[in-house]
Amino acid sequence: MLHQDGHAGILTLRLDHGKANALDRELLESLSAALERLESDASLKAAVLTGSGTIFCAGVDLYRVVEGGAAYARAFVPVLGTAFHRLFACAKPVVAAVNGHAIAGGCVLAAACDYRLMARGPGTIGVPELRVGVPFPLVAIEILRFATSAAHLQELVYQGTTYSTDVAYERGLVDELVEPDVVVDRAREVAQRLAGEPAARFRLTKRQLRAPTIAAIAAHAAETDAAVLAEWERPETLEAIRAYLEARRRG
C-alpha cells in the first residue's frame, strides 16, 4: 500500500495501491503516519514521495466513495484533509518524484511538496474535480493556490484541465522534468541537498513561506469543510460520481 525505505537519512515513500494508487482512507492514514514518523525520527532528514508503475496517483478512489456512500464519505473527507495538511506543513523537506499521471488528489499531493520533479513522457497532471462533481476540502484549494501562479489557478481548477509534462513545467506546476528512469534518483539528490541545510534554518524558512496558507486554512476550514462534507454526502453527488465513472469506462 505504502512502501517505506529509509536510506542515508532519506525516507522514500512509494504509493503502491492498486493499478492507479488511488487514495482511500487506509492509504491516507498510512501516509499521515509515515509523515509523522518522518518528523519524529531524528535519523530521517527528508523524504521523497513517488508512485508505482506509470502512475503517481490518480486521485481519490471514487469507486470506494460510491460503494461506501454517505457513511464512507463522512469518514473519508476529514482523513483526506488531514493527510494533505500534514504533507504541506511537514517541517522536513519532502520532494515529489512524479513518475506518471498525477490527477486530482495526486496533483495536490505533488503540489504540497517542497520540490516537484516529473518524468518526461505521457503522464499528465491536473485537478478535474468540478468535472467529477465533488469539491475539494479547503486545504487542497489553498495548497494549489500556494503552488500555482495566480494567472493559471482558475484555469487549473475551473476547467479541470490536465496538463502534459511540458505544459505543467511551463506553468510552474512542476519544477523540473527528468527522464523516467532517473526521476526517483534525481528526487533523492534534491532531498539530500535540502536536508543538507541546517534543520532549524530550513524549518523556520519553510514556516515563513507557508504560514499565510496554513493560517488561511485554520481560519476558514471549519466553515467551508462542513459545506464540502455535506456536498460529498448528497445522493446527487454520488450519482454524479457514478455517471463520471461510467463515462470514463466507456472511454
Image (cartoon, rainbow, N blue to C red):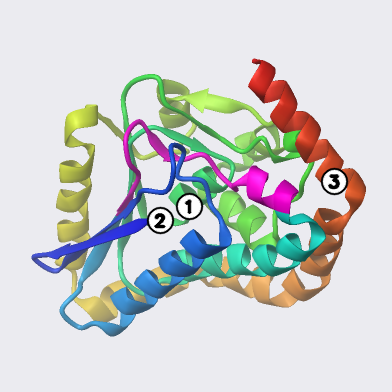
Residue 153 falls in image quadrant = top right
**Is any atom of residue 30 visible in this view?**
yes
Which residue does the image show at 47% across and 60% down from the upper left?
A: 27
User: Mark 1 sits on what residue?
Assistant: 109
- Start and end of the magenta stretch? 49-67
Residue type highlighted by circle 2: Cys
* Position of residue 112 in the picture relative to residue 64 (left or right): left
* Position of residue 147 in the picture relative to residue 128 (left or right): left
Q: Secondary structure at mark 1?
A: helix
Residue 1 falls in image quadrant = bottom left
Q: Residue furthest front?
A: 67
Which residue does the image show at 57% across and 27% down from the upper left?
A: 162
**Callout 2 crowding tier (Cα within 10 Å): few <14, some 14–19, many ≥20:** many
Residue type highlighted by circle 1: Leu
User: Which quarter of the rendering shows the C terminus?
Assistant: top right
Residue type highlighted by circle 3: Thr
Any mark on residue 113, and which?
Answer: 2
Which residue does the image show at 85% across and 46% down from the upper left?
A: 237
Give coordinates of residue 160: x percent, y percent. Answer: 68, 31
Taking the magenta stretch, the answer to whether it contains residue 55 is yes
- The reply to whether discs 2 and 1 touch (Cβ–Cβ < 8 Å) is yes
Q: Residue furthest left?
A: 8
192 w.r.t. 169: above or below: below
Give coordinates of residue 6: x percent, y percent. Answer: 17, 65
The CA span between labels 2 and 1 is 7 Å
Q: Secondary structure at mark 2?
A: loop
Residue 230 falls in image quadrant = bottom right
User: Mark 3 sits on what residue?
Assistant: 237
Which residue does the image show at 42% across and 65% down from the upper left?
A: 31
